[in-house]
Image (cartoon, rainbow, N blue to C red):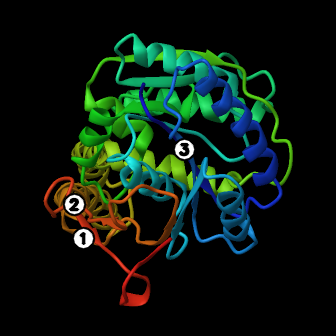
Amino acid sequence: MDKLYLVIPCYNEEEVIGETAARLRSKMNALIARRLIAEDSRVVFVNDGSRDRTWTLIEELHRADPLFAGINLARNRGHQNALLAGLLTVKEHADVVISLDADLQDDIGAIDEFVDKYRQGFDIVYGVRKAREKDTFFKRATAQGFYRLMSMMGAELVYNHADYRLMSRRALDGLAEFGEANLFLRGIVPLIGYPSAIVEYERSERFAGESKYPLKKMLAFALQGITSFSIKPIRMISALGFFIFAVSLIMLGYFLSVHFTGHTVPGWTTIAISVWAIGGLQLLGIGVIGEYIGKTYLETKRRPKFIVERTLGVADGGLVSVGASGRAPGSLEVAGAAGGAARKA
């Protein structure tokens, strides 16, 4: 039987982690009893630098039940990096991994269908929301607009899919080959290319605590996705520069005709032509330079995406951090807290 690991990023989730653990324990035990997954499957909580008692509760869960494991990051790195940390830390020990959020708004009943799809031969299974009736009009409209915009920009996204997905070990090996410094996993995973399937589910309300994605973070996340997967915004600036410069040539003829017919004050023609022509050339120049800077920027950053400070209950394999783009694809290096040796329980 295949070993299943659930990977759950956590940031200040002390209000929900107890209920989340209880529900996932019941679900995992049911899958084990039906002999759909191995007995040494695990639920792995990834603590993303929480400032509350989240890590303490993870330690207590691990001591009480070996089903629960933990990964503690050295500092807060954001949801996408925390998720990647969990996926790449456990990929050598699991046959299949499912990622989901700690608030369990994503229906865990769909896990059974995820496993069925995996057993049918699919390496990646996307959890897709059936509808968005429970969302506010603003959130629903902005979400739909985001997916349409990303499609226009050329990114391959699964509509209404967040980060609730199943990935096989070979799919995770493929994910490790991507060295982007600016992570947007919803766009990266479809690029892996292995056989994939979709499971639809109903999304519930958060049962406790506050959302960790307020409007400000959602906008930043959307901008991250757009700039990580497309240089079309830069090309739009270039196109705008060409357009304004072309208009400036047309206006040049108009200004000259007005000048020679004597219907303008001295100096007005020169100023008007200068503003239009120089403005267009500046936008054109910024667009061309930005084209190169945008590409170079993504290739030159070499900061680690995350540093694991401690693990609990994860099989032997060491603590790892993943290098940014420019290092060997999929390369892993041992990392310790504050430059010291990493601790492992």
- Mark whose residue sits in front, 3 or 1: 3
Residue holding disc 1 = 302
Give the mark, 1 or 2, whose residue is nearer the N terminus: 1
Q: Does residue 306 sit above or below 7 in this rendering?
A: below
Residue marked by disc 2: 325
> Mark 3 — residue?
42
Label 3, secondary structure: give it: strand
Query: Badges 3 and 2: C-beta atoms under 8 Å apart?
Result: no
- Quadrant hosting residue 146: top right
Measured in 3D between alpha carbons, the distance from the residue under mark 1 to the one under mark 2, in whole angstroms, is 6 Å
Residue at 37% x, 89% y: name it.
Answer: 340
| Comes first in the chain, label 3 or label 1 | 3
Give the alpha-carbon distance from disc 3 to disc 2, as whole Å.
30 Å
In the image: residue 139, left or right of residue 320: right
Q: Is residue 236 visible?
A: no
| Vertical position of residue 142 compared to residue 202: above or below | below
Nearer to me, 219 or 4: 4
Quadrant of res 167? top left
